[in-house]
Image (tube, coloured by chain):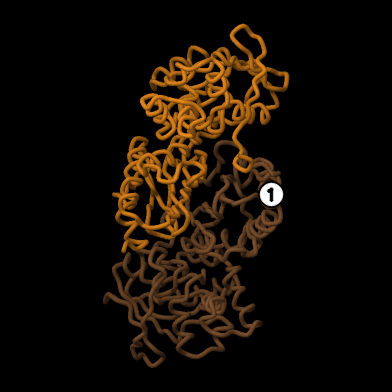
Chain colours: A orange, B brown
Amino acid sequence: MLSEFDLIKQYFVRPHHPTRAALGIGDDCALLAPTPGMQLAISSDMLVEGRHFFAGADPRKLGHKCLAVNLSDLAAMGARPLGFTLALALPAAERGWLAGFAEGLFALADAFNIELIGGDTTKGPLNICITVFGEVAPGQALRRDAARAGDDIWISGTLGDARLALAGYREELTLTPAALEAAAVRMHTPVPRVELGSLLAGQRLAHAAIDISDGLVGDLGHILARSGVGATLQVDALPPGAVLATRETALRRAFTAAGGDDYELCFTAPVSARAAILAAADSVATPVSRVGTIDAQAGLRLVDAAGQELGLKLSSFDHFSA
Amino acid sequence: MLSEFDLIKQYFVRPHHPTRAALGIGDDCALLAPTPGMQLAISSDMLVEGRHFFAGADPRKLGHKCLAVNLSDLAAMGARPLGFTLALALPAAERGWLAGFAEGLFALADAFNIELIGGDTTKGPLNICITVFGEVAPGQALRRDAARAGDDIWISGTLGDARLALAGYREELTLTPAALEAAAVRMHTPVPRVELGSLLAGQRLAHAAIDISDGLVGDLGHILARSGVGATLQVDALPPGAVLATRETALRRAFTAAGGDDYELCFTAPVSARAAILAAADSVATPVSRVGTIDAQAGLRLVDAAGQELGLKLSSFDHFSA
């Protein structure tokens, strides 16, 4: 029988790095010592079984993904990750699950040199709540309300393969096993664009940014609403994932524009920054694509390569209506 | 039909106080601007329906309690609260529940002048995960590993009424309706000892501290283990809650020593600090009691008023064995 304290000790307490946190797991609170004068960026995401991941999901991939989606929020703010807390409700303390989950979680944490500094474990329906901490210089954070008319709209990486994998699992369409497996990598193990976000903020290249979790159209819509602007999006310029790229135009358009679960960055930047953005993205081996323009006129216009408006019906994911 | 964004806007977005957070709800991350040079204290607690509270619990009390238990962790560290995030999984977006929950949550937040700076909402089995942020000067945090042989052991407030109420609800014993109602106040609306913790840290009066959530014996045990010391606890000196005080000795001893859900502070301090501790506690109208001594010898000895060792069988709460 694994007790709560044994569980924490065996799977989640690791050698403490005093350079990252002043005090880690094991007290009433963790202590972080932020760089004096820096702002602290904070984000919480909660993942629920059957909602954000399938029951019986591979715990190693789940450990990766639940931290990745939180780091993606730091990336979209341009913040450098410092650490995270984990609150975990588990139906039972299963050793195999815990070992796999911890392996996936810490592999990603190590990749970004961040530490698990505290949290909570309890019995209950499987629920994973992570809160991440990062830091960013005052005035450099990439906010949603800072897009300006005339800005280019950029996307990192590719879009739509995570949504394509979901469609495959749901049997909304037919994928070969090889295609499903390839697309599913994007669904299960998203890579947060932390280095790119950090460069865009640190070099003051971008105005506004958001990470694409609920689908580009909806997430870009948040930038437009908060910034009081509109946009024209060249749908056929949206970079499809490698598997989606082999599919028909209508599907490609729908899943790149409104797929969801992409965890790429959508950011806006002045035309004068184009060369610097390409150089910055190249320096961290992250592809970026220009996909549209911010307009003074409200509303989002979806156009094809010829500039013709497309009558696409797309909607963003809503956790209480879906 | 209440959408996720309407839900957040209607119930959880309030006027933003830029003095507390540099950027509140509505972006990828919140931004906090900690006082330069201060350490950031962070704690996460997750509350699950049926585990930490009854199904159908009063949402207003629940809103209070889930923030209170987190603030209690800041209090036990001696940190001044700055803000918190809320991640909430809800089976459905019910307006009455949300309004009550938000009312209880924000009444307590306002009492401590702190702001909800971000979070997440999703559909799922009812689960409330709060992460709180506070600040404390370097070297002043009240840690579990700092108790020293010869220290007095102190308790704030009273113990056991929350456990007594639980026993009443579970019908483990009989309480009059008036007694149950009075005891239940301690179970539903604990008051975090934030001001006392802050004074103990700021005036460097205490060595070690912990908040009593799983029962004094177990929680004090964490201090002993981390500090490499033992203790003698005068069980009959433990201050019982007003309702528990009317009950028989055996019950009083069991529920003060190992009741749980008290959210009082247990702290250790040098004998020389006695007068200053009483003055500090008096200045924030928080009663405190001296209840034992930290020993160099390992182990926890429970003694009666005559100094005779008691053969009490007590155990702390474990979320995976209970």
Q: Residue B233: x, y in percent?
A: 38, 81
The residue wearing badge 1 is B11
In which quadrant of the rendered view does residue A111 lie? top left
Q: Is residue A145 visible?
A: no
**Which residue sits furthest right?**
A297
Question: What's the residue at 33%, 88% (across, down)?
Answer: B309
Q: Is residue A150 above or below residue A133?
A: above
Q: Considering the numbered disc 1 on the image, is that residue within a helix, a strand or a loop?
A: helix
Give percent across and percent down for residue A205. Answer: 52, 21
Give the side of residue A92 with respect to residue B20, left or right: left
Q: What residue is rendered at 50% in x and 39% in y?
A: A37
Q: Residue at x 49, y 12 (%)?
A: A275
Q: Quadrant of the C terminus of chain A?
A: top right
**Chain under numbered label 1:** B
Pinpoint residue A174: horizontal percent, then vertical percent. 46, 26
The quarter in which the N terminus of chain A is drawn is bottom left
Quadrant in which residue A253 is drawn = top right
Residue B116 seen in render: yes
